[in-house]
Image (tube, grey):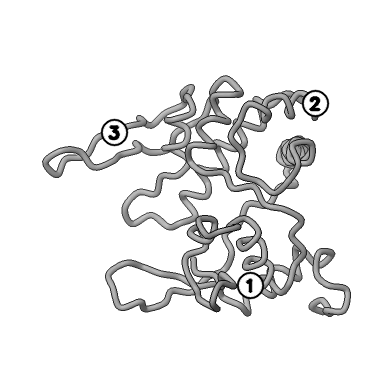
Amino acid sequence: QDAASGVENIRQPFGQIFELPGGANVAKTALSLDLNDVAIDGTWSLTTPNLAALVNAVGGVKVNVDVDVEEPGAGGTTVVVVQSGEQELDGARAAEFAAYQARNEPEAAELNRFRTVMQAVFDSLPPKVAQVKSVLSHQRLTTTLSLSTLAQLLVDLAHDDATNNLLAQLLPTGQIDNGTATESYRLDSVAATAFVRQHFAASLPRHRPTAR
């Protein structure tokens, strides 16, 4: 998904913004601008290696892998790196599964797998903020939040997930023609405005009216 980076007024894939100087703050500003100036207090970039380390820190996770996770092998073959079925996964295999999108699958399939892994992480986290803070203290974190704030956030997310109050949803996008065979998308500003006003009205600037 493309986003305005705020650097020389260019647009680029949102994930690449984190690689810019001061990338976390640039990404926070870019996302806020794209979402009607919604307030964003901080960022936490959960990269594939970071997710693998977090899963290992909680002792692995038990998930139901819905498909064989494959990757290209030698001579045009494919190699199954994670077999389907309910099983215990270590960090590396959990991260592979969480980021997997099979050929011709919608992007929502990858989101569901990521959520499955994160739900298992939430289930495995200790219940107290101080205990979660101890787990995080051994991680290489890419975040603008303090360790205490991030630990509290994870405890709150675990509670919301357990009570079915956690929303996991793709932002609305539209496909764009970039002149190549690679599919590219940009944020659907009209649909995104409606989405933000429905779910994050309290985080919008006070002078901005909400949808009626």
Real-space Cα distance between discs 2 and 1?
A: 35 Å
The mark nearer the N terminus, 3 or 2, is 3
Instruction: Classify residue 134 by image quadrant.
Output: top right
- Identify the residue position indicated by label 3 in the image: 80
Real-space Cα distance between discs 3 and 2?
A: 39 Å
* Residue type for callout 1: Asp
Residue at the extreme front of the image, as rendered: 21
- Identify the residue position indicated by label 1 in the image: 34
Q: What element carries label 3?
A: strand
Q: Where in the figure is residue 48, as x and y percent of width and height?
A: 48, 41
Q: Which of 43 and 96 is in front in this view?
A: 43
Q: Where in the figure is residue 113, as x and y percent of width and height?
A: 50, 42
Is residue 30 found left or right of 16 in the rendered image? right
| Residue at horizontal 79 percent and vertical 78 percent from the top | 211
The mark nearer the N terminus, 1 or 3, is 1
Q: Is residue 19 above or below residue 182?
A: above
Q: Which of 125 and 13 is in front in this view?
A: 13
Real-space Cα distance between discs 1 and 3?
A: 38 Å
Q: Is mark 2 on a helix, strand or loop?
A: helix
Crowding near the residue tagged with mark 3, few <14, some 14–19, many ≥20 C-alpha atoms within 10 Å? few
Q: Is residue 19 above or below residue 176?
A: above
| Residue at horizontal 65 percent and vertical 59 percent from the top | 25
- Identify the residue position indicated by label 2 in the image: 130
| Residue at horizontal 47 percent and vertical 49 percent from the top | 110
Q: Is mark 1 on a helix, strand or loop?
A: helix
Q: Where in the figure is residue 185, as x and y percent of width and height?
A: 45, 70
Instruction: Classify residue 78 by image quadrant.
Output: top left
